[in-house]
Structures are given as C-alpha cells and as structure tokens.
C-alpha cells in the first residue's frame, strides 16, 4: 500500500511536470503576421491541421497535430496529401522525410479551389505588414493572389511569413540614334524609324500577360522586331501574338500564351522590341507620346494593370530670315537655299511644301520628297519642320536679283532641347537663322561713260583744229 501511494505520487508529479512543460491554450488566440505585403493583393489562409498541444522550443520542441475536419479527405489513406504527410492510427500527423513542401502547397491550393474548401481568413495587402488574429491554433497554408507564398506556419500561438512576391512591372524606353542609348525621350526626323523597348519583370504568379501600347498620332506603328526572355530570343509561334485590331484604343498588343506564362518564374525578364515611324502629323517642339502597360491576372483570376510607362519623341524646326545690308527689316525675296546633312553639301534634305502660316512659307521634311531647294517669299522667310537634333549645312544656291550670293555655307546645330546655333552674326541660342546679303555695285562697261568721254574729247580736238586752220588762212590772205 505504501508503495502504491509512492507510485501514485510519482505519477501525479509527472503529470504536473508535463502540464507545466506543455502550453495550455484555448481556441481563437493565435495570430499570423504577413510581412512586406503587396498593396491590394489578396491574402488567404487555410488551417490544414489542428494543433492539440506543443512543448519546448528549438530542437526540443514538440507539437501534436491532427488533420482539420475540412481536409480529412485530402489526407485520407491513399489520397494526395499522404504523399507529403503521414497520419498514424490515432490521427496524429508528421511530415514525411524529404517531403517537397513547396510542391505540396501548390497542390493543396488546387485541391482547395476544386473542392471549394472554405478558407480561414482573407484580407488585402497594404504594402506593409498585415496580421490575421483570433485564429484557432494549428498549421496554416498562406496564399497570395500575386503568387502562392508557399508558406506553411504554425500558430503556437504566433506565426509569421515574409512576402517574397511583388507585382510585375513594365518599363518603357526609346532609343536615341545619335548616341545609341536608351532613355525616356529622343529626337527624330519626320519619316525616320524610332526604336522602342518594353521591359517586363515577372513577379509572383504569371498569368494571362498582355502588353498594351498606345502611340500619339505623330507615330505610326511599324512592327515588333523581337521578344527576348532573359536575353534569349523567343519565337512568336506558341508563345505570343501581336494584335493590331484592339478594342481599348491601344495601337497594338502583345498577348502571351498560357503555356509561355506558365513557364515564367519570379525575376524573369521579358523584353519586347518594336518600331514606329515619325509621320507627318508630328508637332514640332511638342512630344509625341508613346505609353505602355502590362495587363495580368492574379492567382484568383482578377485582372490588374501596371502603371503606364511613357516615352517622348521630339522633332524640331529651323526658321530662316533673309535680309540685306545689315538691316533685318530690309527682307529679301527670291533667295534660294538647300539644306544638307554633310559638310561637303552632297546629301540634301528633301521636303514638301505644306502650308503658308500667316506670311511665312513652311516646308516639311519628307525622305521621299522631290523638293531640295527652298525660295524665300515676300517676307524674306521660310521655316523647315521635322528635323532631328544634329548638325546641318545651309547653302545659298541663288541670290536675289542685284545681290551677291554667299560664298560660305552656314553651319547650323540643333540640340536636344531644340535650341539653334549657327555660324552667322546672330548670337548663339537664336530662335531663327538670319542670313545677310550685300547689294552689288554697278561697274563701268565698254558702252558707257568711258567711250562717250573719248568721243567728246575727239570732237573738241576736231573743232579746235578747224578753228586753227581757219584762223591761219585768214592771216595768210591779209598778208
């Protein structure tokens, strides 16, 4: 009897020790914190296993799990869940050695969707940390609409996961031909092809990617020249299609296939290269805008759009005034000029005359045009529109009647802000090029005053000789 009492006391002590070592808890006091959430993404949790008890920490921790009622079928004998977890005769769950839990989360989420398993909480991301509270303790799967977090955590009582996904992004660039660099703006000549690229950075769950591009009227879409994935060329067949008949007022779209999107992973980079032509609708000194954005769907099938990324393409003008003898008010009509792109003046810029604005004649660049010579009108002016930034050479090919033709070529530069500099008397930074001509002076000719003078002198000599002869004859008769 004495031994029985000692044994009972020992058992009671062990129970008390176990009770002290084991955390006692009630349902509804667990929390899960998701750190670094993506703004407006949907976060959803599922309790896979109930946590009956836990003790210790670190390597000496002990947790007792049982399958939650909603997931009984998924973890039944022979079911998919048993590939990753064992369930013993008493219903306790342990993870299989070397189980691929990342794969497990994807399959568990698919099962939940296909079998309408109710979640245990959902909320929106804020761009900062969010917290689920009042949870029954257990083993939870955390899902994000921008991609499965592949996060499993135990609330004992608090669990934490870190969001490693982010929304995909699209950045648009245009190529500046004079430097070969990519940026957010460039200059071009009317009729010139302009190169663009849209860089898409994949994040999270990639689904139904569609790139949209919209151009101003001064740009004419030409073609998609190539698409790359992580620097490697992607063929169009089976991977993407270019659509120019759109319903959302975009100029064109690149639609990526479901198979292609399924092959993407976070951090992949897609680059779409394409061209447009600066056309005759371009407005000088005003940007022709071209913006692009990415449309995509999240893991729940909801459609999202990235922010629009914009580039600007400029074209410039060259106003010219022709005047005489140092007076800019003394304008000259009838002076003829050509504009060249080379110093030797062999490559002439071609134009077409488009309109007379007020009193100034306007010529527009046209690569296939027929006009290479421009004549000043009665205002002494003309204006060339549609020029790229760069260096040009303005040569007078014919002077107005009565004026000397320039024997030098005017070198003109247009910078990337449209400012004009020229080798004329006008100071740098002028708003127009002012070209002076000098009037010619009349020279004596063989049919002018020079001959008349000889006639007059000759006549005087003849008359003098006659007078002398008559005088001598009279004197002779008197003698």
Image (cartoon, rainbow, N blue to C red):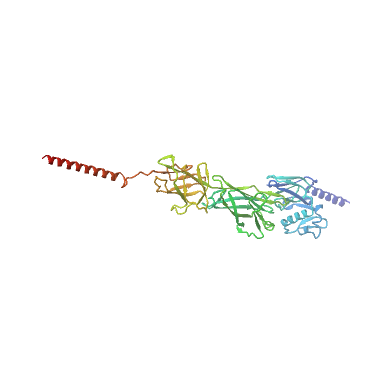
Depth check, front residue: 5 or 428: 428
Image quarter hosting the C terminus: top left
Residue that lies at the very extreme toward the left in this rendered image: 479
Rendered residue at 17%/41% (across/down): 470
* Left or right: 17 in relation to 321: right
Q: Splitting the image into 4 quarters, where does residue 255 fall?
A: bottom right
**Residue 237: percent from the left, percent from the top?**
65, 60
Q: Could you tell me residue 294's position as x and y percent?
A: 65, 51
Q: Residue at x 13, y 40 (%)?
A: 475
**Nearest to the observer: residue 360 or residue 426:** 360
Of the pair 169 and 454, the residue shown nearer to us? 454
Question: Extreme front residue here?
Answer: 477
Query: Which percent across, then down, holds residue 458?
Result: 24, 44
Q: Is residue 393 something that shows in the picture?
A: no
- Judged left or right of residue 441, residue 129 is right
* In front of the other: 57 or 311: 311
The percent coordinates of residue 40 (x first, y second) are 70, 46
Q: Is residue 370 visible?
A: yes
Q: How many marks?
A: 0
């Amino acid at each position: 009897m004495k031994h029985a009492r000692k044994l009972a006391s020992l058992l009671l002590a062990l129970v008390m020790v176990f009770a002290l070592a084991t955390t006692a808890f009630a349902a509804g006091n667990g929390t899960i914190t998701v750190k670094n959430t993506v703004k407006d993404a949907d976060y959803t949790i599922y309790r896979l296993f109930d946590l009956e008890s836990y003790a210790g920490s670190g390597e000496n921790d002990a947790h007792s799990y049982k399958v939650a009622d909603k997931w009984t079928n998924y973890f039944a004998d022979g079911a998919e869940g048993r590939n990753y977890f064992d369930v013993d005769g008493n219903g306790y769950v342990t993870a299989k050695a070397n189980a691929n839990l990342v794969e497990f989360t994807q399959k568990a989420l698919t099962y939940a969707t296909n079998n309408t398993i109710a979640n245990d909480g959902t909320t929106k991301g804020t761009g900062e940390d969010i917290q689920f509270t009042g949870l029954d303790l257990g083993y939870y799967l955390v899902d994000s609409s921008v991609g499965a977090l592949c996060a499993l955590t135990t609330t004992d009582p608090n669990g934490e996961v870190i969001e490693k996904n982010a929304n995909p992004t699209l950045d648009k660039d245009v190529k500046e031909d004079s430097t070969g660099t990519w940026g957010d703006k460039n200059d071009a000549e009317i009729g010139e092809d302009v190169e663009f690229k849209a860089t898409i950075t994949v994040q999270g769950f990639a689904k139904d990617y569609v790139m949209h591009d919209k151009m101003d009227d001064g740009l004419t879409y030409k073609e998609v020249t190539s698409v790359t994935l992580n620097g490697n060329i992607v063929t169009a067949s089976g991977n993407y299609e270019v659509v120019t008949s759109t319903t959302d007022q975009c100029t064109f779209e690149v639609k990526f296939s479901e198979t292609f999107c399924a092959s993407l992973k976070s951090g992949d980079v897609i680059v779409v290269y394409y061209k447009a032509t600066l056309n005759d609708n371009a407005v000088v000194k005003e940007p022709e805008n071209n913006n692009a954005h990415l449309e995509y769907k999240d893991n729940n099938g909801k459609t999202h759009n990235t922010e629009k990324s914009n580039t600007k393409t400029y074209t410039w003008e060259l106003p010219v005034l022709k005047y005489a003898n140092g007076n800019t008010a003394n304008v000259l009509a009838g002076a003829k000029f050509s504009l060249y792109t080379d110093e030797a003046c062999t490559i002439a810029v071609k134009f077409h005359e488009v309109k007379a604005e007020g009193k100034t004649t306007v010529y527009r660049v046209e690569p296939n045009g027929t006009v290479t010579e421009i004549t000043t009108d009665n205002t002494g002016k003309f204006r060339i529109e549609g020029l790229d930034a760069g260096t040009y050479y303005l040569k007078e090919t014919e002077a107005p009647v009565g004026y000397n033709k320039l024997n030098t070529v005017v070198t003109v530069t247009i910078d990337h802000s449209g400012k004009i500099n020229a080798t004329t008397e006008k100071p740098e930074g002028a708003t127009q090029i002012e070209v002076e001509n000098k009037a010619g002076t009349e020279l004596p000719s063989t049919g002018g005053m020079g001959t008349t003078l000889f006639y007059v002198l000759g006549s005087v000599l003849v008359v003098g000789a006659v007078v002398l002869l008559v005088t001598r004859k009279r004197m002779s008769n008197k003698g």
